[in-house]
Image (cartoon, rainbow, N blue to C red):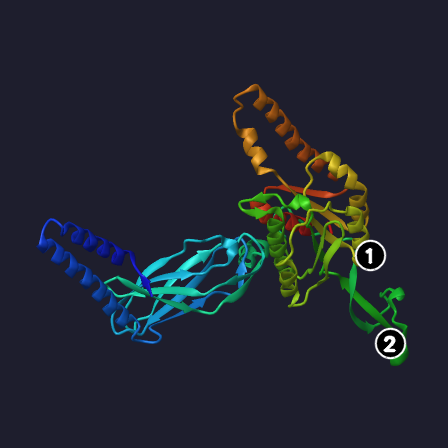
């Protein structure tokens, strides 16, 4: 049982009246009557609230998986079994990650009439987090006493990468790519895959004769191949210290993970084989490319609990790992961040080694805070110097693109908020140009 502010307010007023009773006997008697009435009313209200063993019931409805960076709805349903209307204060114990300490909703619960409250949660981190109980503080219309109910079971939820965005770009990316100005060209020596075995005819290439099938059928048979439509796409994510920078409350790693998840979904819909790899000072998670239905589930389970590390990323180990485990020519989309052209030059030999065997696309990020600072007007000599340094750093980012292109490596410099759209557009452009 909890005594409310209204109870203490009325009790304080009655005590003041009793104190003023020193001036007049009638005032003293009135004060005593008020004090007794306050305690009596509190006792009656307590009796009404505790007459039922379980006067209020509550159920929390929340998905087992929350989408990182998106609004996720949570609903708390309540039902009162009291024969009178109850004023309720509802406190839902959210996961610590949200840092919400003052969440409280008030509502009226009518007899037998269910009510509910809804609110939105926008997580900024991935991982597994726990909801606590739902606390309901019920009182009658008198509002002197509250009864606390501890309802709803604790629940663990997983915050996954932004799966709510998977269908957002589907209509745009799944259109026919043979638009005006884009001509699909059959490539000589293109990768092929086995289609069928058929009878040999004089125009067939004798080098494709299947001798085993010919021996069984006692006539010449040839293998028929067709251009390989399913290409291999790998999202390779740097989880080193350079990806710890935050934008809009989310790290660059989280933005990269959300973009790679959407790209994987679209690539699977376009019949490509999709894989995943992470690395920092050593190779991390690796998921071989595939086109099966469970591949998106595997990618989600792999990505949801990956975090950045403080180690320096080892591109030499990444190059060795890719060349060892990715044998077929693939589109490698590498999400990382280079702050200077010198940092790129140190890693360039390893990137060139990957580019010799695969189509490599480097995705790195604009510094939004630095760009905003450049746009501001300097007000002192010191700020002029700082602007020059900031502009020099911004120019180096663009010089990185030029250096990568000179070495036959594709590059994409983008802002975190536009990452998903820019990566999808680049992927579509690469597909349309048959550059894999």
Q: In this view, does 82 lie above or below 279?
A: below
Q: Which of marks 2 and 1 is nearer the N terminus?
A: 2
User: What residue does disc 1 label?
Assistant: 324
Give the residue at x 82% y 52%: 320
> Which quadrant would the N terminus be assigned to in this image?
bottom left
Label 1 residue SS? helix
Give the residue at x 46% y 53%: 100
Label 2 residue SS? helix
Picture coordinates of residue 338, whole percent (x, y): 69, 40
Front-most of residues 135 and 7: 7
Whether residue 186 is visible to the viewer of this picture, yes or no, is no
- Tell me the crowding category of disc 1: few under 14, some 14 to 19, or many 20 or more residues within 10 angstroms, Cα based: few
Task: Nearest to the eye among marks 2 and 1: give it.
Answer: 1
Picture coordinates of residue 387, whole percent (x, y): 59, 26
User: What residue does disc 2 label?
Assistant: 213
Front-most of residues 30 and 219: 30
Picture coordinates of residue 200, whole percent (x, y): 85, 71
- Tell me the crowding category of disc 2: few under 14, some 14 to 19, or many 20 or more residues within 10 angstroms, Cα based: some
Q: How far apart are marks 2 and 1 (CA)?
A: 34 Å
71 relative position to 300: left or right: left
Give the residue at x 43% y 61%: 92
**Residue 330 sits in quarter:** bottom right
Give the residue at x 80% y 45%: 350
């Amino acid at each position: 049982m909890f005594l409310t502010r209204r109870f203490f307010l009325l009790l304080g007023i009655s005590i003041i009246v009793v104190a003023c009773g020193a001036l007049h006997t009638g005032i003293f008697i009135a004060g005593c009557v008020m004090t007794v009435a306050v305690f009596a009313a509190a006792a009656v209200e307590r009796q009404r609230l505790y007459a039922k063993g379980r006067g209020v019931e509550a159920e929390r409805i929340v998905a087992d998986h929350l989408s990182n960076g998106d609004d996720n709805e949570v609903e708390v349903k309540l039902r009162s079994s009291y024969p009178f209307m109850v004023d309720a204060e509802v406190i839902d114990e959210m996961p610590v990650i949200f840092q919400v300490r003052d969440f409280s909703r008030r509502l009226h619960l009518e007899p037998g009439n269910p009510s509910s409250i809804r609110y939105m949660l926008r997580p900024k981190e991935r991982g597994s987090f726990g909801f606590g109980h739902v606390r309901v503080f019920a009182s009658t219309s008198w509002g002197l006493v509250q009864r606390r109910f501890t309802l709803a079971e604790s629940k663990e939820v997983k915050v996954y990468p932004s799966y709510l965005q998977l269908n957002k770009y589907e209509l745009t990316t799944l259109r026919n790519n043979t638009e005006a100005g884009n001509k699909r060209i059959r490539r000589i020596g293109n990768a092929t895959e086995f289609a069928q075995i058929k009878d040999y005819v004089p125009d067939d290439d004798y080098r494709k004769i299947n001798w085993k099938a010919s021996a069984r059928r006692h006539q010449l048979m040839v293998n028929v191949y067709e251009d390989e439509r399913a290409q291999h796409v790998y999202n390779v994510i740097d989880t080193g210290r350079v990806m710890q920078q935050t934008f809009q409350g989310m790290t660059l790693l989280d933005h990269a993970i959300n973009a790679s998840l959407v790209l994987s979904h679209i690539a699977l819909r376009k019949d490509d084989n999709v894989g995943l790899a992470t690395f920092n000072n050593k190779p991390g998670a690796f998921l071989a490319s595939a086109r099966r239905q469970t591949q998106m589930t595997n990618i989600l389970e792999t990505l949801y609990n990956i975090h950045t590390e403080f180690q320096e990323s080892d591109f030499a180990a990444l190059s060795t790992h890719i060349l060892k485990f990715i044998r077929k020519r693939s589109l490698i989309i590498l999400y990382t961040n280079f702050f200077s052209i010198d940092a790129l030059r140190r890693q360039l030999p390893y990137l060139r080694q990957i580019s010799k065997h695969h189509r490599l696309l480097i995705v790195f990020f604009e510094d939004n805070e630095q760009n905003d600072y450049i746009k501001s007007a300097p007000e002192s000599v010191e700020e002029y110097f700082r602007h020059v340094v900031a502009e020099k750093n911004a120019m180096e980012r663009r010089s990185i693109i030029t250096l990568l292109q000179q070495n036959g490596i594709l590059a994409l410099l983008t802002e975190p908020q536009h990452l998903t759209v820019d990566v999808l557009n680049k992927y579509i452009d690469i597909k349309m140009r048959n550059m894999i």
